[in-house]
Image (cartoon, rainbow, N blue to C red):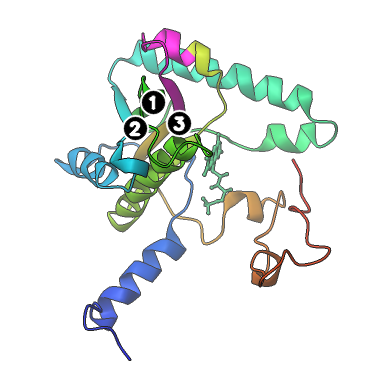
């Protein structure tokens, strides 16, 4: 039976469409975010679910070019270090664009708040649920940005200590994302890592099991 709380079919189609068409974006074009959109994106993030309702997310908007370039430097150093650590495919990896920090209209650093250890509700065995909660907040922002035609890229290639120091973050906080946001020329139909041959979306039967782990099912074929 159809739930009486169900949205109209056209609204459901929009939800499915935005989920399908959301992309991680690293190529931006010139321009700004429409007036008021940044606030709405931040509010969308803040409406996210969080374990024990702890709301562990904190957002730092990067406004100066100097800080933006310092962040980019931290990311680029990590990109080079990642390439050096890959046993193979370093050249393939270096061809990938992994951030749009210098070109994006807006850059936000998302961090976990300090003092998270005081929140035990739901985190006794899985303390990383604070991170999971913050990822949900970012996903909210990602979906609204896509619906607004604005690209968002999640950059995680960085030394958290270096970012923490740059932004004068308090002890116990932890940056987990540099988000690049802005107008784009296009939203690719498939993930860039797929179209560039780095990985592919796994078939459903390799990720969904019944009762027990499916014998022989392992991790992703592309391990790095
Ligand atoms: C937690 C997380 C961290 C990520 N970090 C990076 C990153 O540092 N650089 C990058 O280019 N993409 C990064 N991505 C984006 C992924 O590469 C992207 O989500 C994946 O290739 C699938 O593409 P899609 O998001 O367009 O579906 C990150 C995504 C997530 C969820």
Looking at the image, which residue sits at the far bottom? 1
Q: CA distance from mark 1 to mark 3?
A: 17 Å
Residue visible at 79% across and 30% down in the picture: 86
The numbered mark at residue 85 is: none
The residue mark sitting in front, 1 or 2, is 1
Q: Give the quarter of the image for residue 9.
A: bottom left
- Up the image or down, 101 lies above or below 172; here it is below
User: Is 204 on the left or on the right of 123, as rendered?
Assistant: right
* Residue wearing tag 3: 177
- Residue underneath mark 2: 56
Around disc 1, counting alpha carbons within 10 Å, would you say few (fewer than 14), some (14 to 19), or many (20 or more)? Answer: some
Q: Secondary structure at mark 2?
A: loop
> On the image, numbered disc 1 is attached to which residue?
116
Magenta-highlighted residues: 163-176
Residue 42 on image: x %, y %: 24, 39
The alpha-carbon separation of the residues under discs 2 and 3 comes to: 13 Å
Q: Earlier in the sequence, mark 2 or mark 3?
A: 2
């Amino acid at each position: 039976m159809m739930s009486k709380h169900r949205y109209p079919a056209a609204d459901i189609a929009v939800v499915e469409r935005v989920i399908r068409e959301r992309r991680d974006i690293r190529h931006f074009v010139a321009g700004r975010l429409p007036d008021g959109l940044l606030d709405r994106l931040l509010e969308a993030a803040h409406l996210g679910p969080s374990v024990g309702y702890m709301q562990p997310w904190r957002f730092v908007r990067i406004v100066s070019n100097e800080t933006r370039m310092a962040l980019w430097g931290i990311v680029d150093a990590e990109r080079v270090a990642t390439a050096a650590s890959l046993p193979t495919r370093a050249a393939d990896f270096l061809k990938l664009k992994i951030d749009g920090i210098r070109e994006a209209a807006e850059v936000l650093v998302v961090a976990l708040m300090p003092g998270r250890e005081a929140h035990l509700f739901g985190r006794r065995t899985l303390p990383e649920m604070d991170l999971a909660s913050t990822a949900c907040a970012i996903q909210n922002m990602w979906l609204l940005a896509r619906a607004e035609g604005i690209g968002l890229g999640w950059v995680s290639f960085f030394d958290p200590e270096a970012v923490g120091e740059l932004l004068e973050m308090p002890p116990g906080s932890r940056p987990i994302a540099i988000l690049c946001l802005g107008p784009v020329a296009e939203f690719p139909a498939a993930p860039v890592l797929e179209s560039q041959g780095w990985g592919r979306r796994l078939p459903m039967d390799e990720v969904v099991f019944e009762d027990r782990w499916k014998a022989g099912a392992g991790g992703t074929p592309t391990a790095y």
